[in-house]
Image (tube, rainbow, N blue to C red):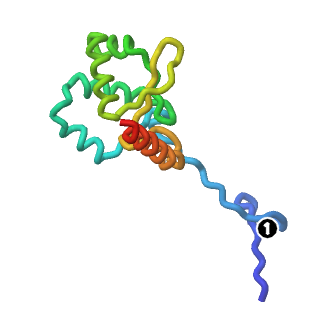
Amino acid sequence: MQRRVGMIDLDTGELLQSGVPIWVGVKVKSPYEEGWVAMNQHFLEEFAARRDIGLEVYRVFLFLDARLNFRNLIQVPQTEIAAALKMKKQSVNRAIHKLEELGIIIRGPKVGKNSSWKLNPNAGWKGRVKELRPAIAEHSHHTKLREEED
């Protein structure tokens, strides 16, 4: 016996003779829309346990995370961070330098007069999941090259 596959119009009950049945799922939209970021829980635990990090560094870190674009890019002027957090610009600058020193954020390209950063993909990620592993590999490669230079 040869099996024949077909389709039925669920509204009319009509048997449709041509075509191939395919399933097309509906993409579920996030309730956060674009306002999400995935964080590495091990990183968060280690970061929270550090005793050499002050409250200002934590606050700047959280603000920068809130401003992540896709592919982990952060583009926000330090003056805007200082105003939003009601901090002195020098304190924001010190916090950013500490985050860079720890490798949590990585200096990115200049955008106009402003600096940009990327969140270390080992800490967290905002972007396509399929691009996460290559980003981690690229970051590890650059980190290894810098260590060899030192």
Amino acid type at mark 1:
Leu
**Taking the image as drawn, is residue 95 in sight?**
yes
Image location of residue 87, percent across then percent down: 26, 13
Nearest the eye: 53 or 61: 53
For the point 37% across and 11% down, the residue is 79
Q: Which quadrant would residue 12 be assigned to in this image? A: bottom right
In front of the other: 107 or 68: 107
Do we see residue 38 in this rendering?
no
Q: Please determine whether, in this image, residue 18 is positioned above or below residue 60.
A: below
Give the percent coordinates (x, y) of residue 92: 30, 17
- Residue under label 1, please give it: 15
Residue 2: name its quadrant.
bottom right
* Figure label count: 1
**87 w.r.t. 143: above or below:** above
Q: Horizontally, is 104 left or right of 10 in the view? A: left
Q: Nearer the viewer, residue 55 or 53?
A: 53
Identify which residue is drawn at 48% across, 49% down: 133
Q: From the top left corner, tell me how far across and down residue 30 is, in percent.
A: 48, 41
What quarter of the picture does the N terminus occupy? Answer: bottom right
The image shows residue 96, relative to residue 139, as above or below, that is: above
* Outermost left residue: 51
Q: Quadrant of the C terminus?
A: top left
Q: Residue furthest front?
A: 149
Point 73% across, 64% down: residue: 21
Name the outermost residue toward the bottom.
Answer: 1
- Secondary element type, mark 1: strand
Crowd class of label 1 (few under 14; some 14 to 19; many from 20; radius 10 Å): few
Q: Residue at x 15, y 34 (%)?
A: 51
